[in-house]
Amino acid sequence: MMLAQLMKDLQDPEMIREAQKMMQDPQFQAQMKKIQESQAFKTSMKKTQDTLKDPEKVKELNAKMEKSVKDGEKELEKLEKLRVEQSAEKSDTKSASGDK
């Protein structure tokens, strides 16, 4: 579901503006530089680069990602539907009790 939410957020201009603003922050840049210089990051990047050199692995990863996004989108739709239903129920309860 997180991947689907990320994909959705990447379509939101406000989220993109906020991300750009964050990335321009000198503190954020310093933290990213620190992370990029760490051995764990370098090892992870090397492993990722090696994986991406194998077309079969890339194909497999793409299929997993697409499935994950589709599954996540379904979960997000369910949550949104539930949120709307609960909101409607609260509204109905307030209307029935005379609250506004």
Image (tube, rainbow, N blue to C red):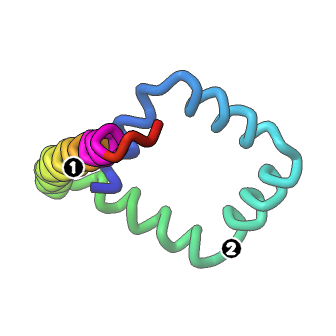
Q: Residue furthest bottom?
A: 40
Q: Residue at x 38, y 40 (%)?
A: 98
Residue indicated by mark 1? 82
Image coordinates for residue 17, horizontal then vertical, percent:
64, 27
Residue receiving disc 2: 38
What SS does tag 1 mark? helix
Q: Is residue 16 visible?
A: yes
* 40 versus 2 height, above or below: below
The amino acid beneath tag 2 is Ser
Q: Position of residue 86 (x, y in %)?
A: 27, 49
Mark 1 vs mark 2, foreground winner is 1
Report the residue at 36% width, 35% height from top: 8
Give the alpha-carbon distance from disc 1 to disc 2, as whole Å.
43 Å
Q: Which residues are magenta?
A: 88-96
Which of pointers 1 and 2 lies earlier in the amino acid sequence?
2
Q: Is residue 19 magenta?
A: no
**Quarter-of-image position of residue 14:** top right
Residue placed most toward the observer, 13 or 41: 13
Task: Identify the residue shown where x is 72% and y is 57%.
Answer: 32
Q: Amino acid at mark 1?
A: Leu
User: Relative to residue 20, is residue 26 depicted above or below?
Assistant: below
Considering the image in quadrants, where does the N terminus appear?
bottom left
Residue at image position (28%, 42%) is 96
Marker disc for residue 26? none
Q: Is residue 22 left or right of residue 7?
A: right
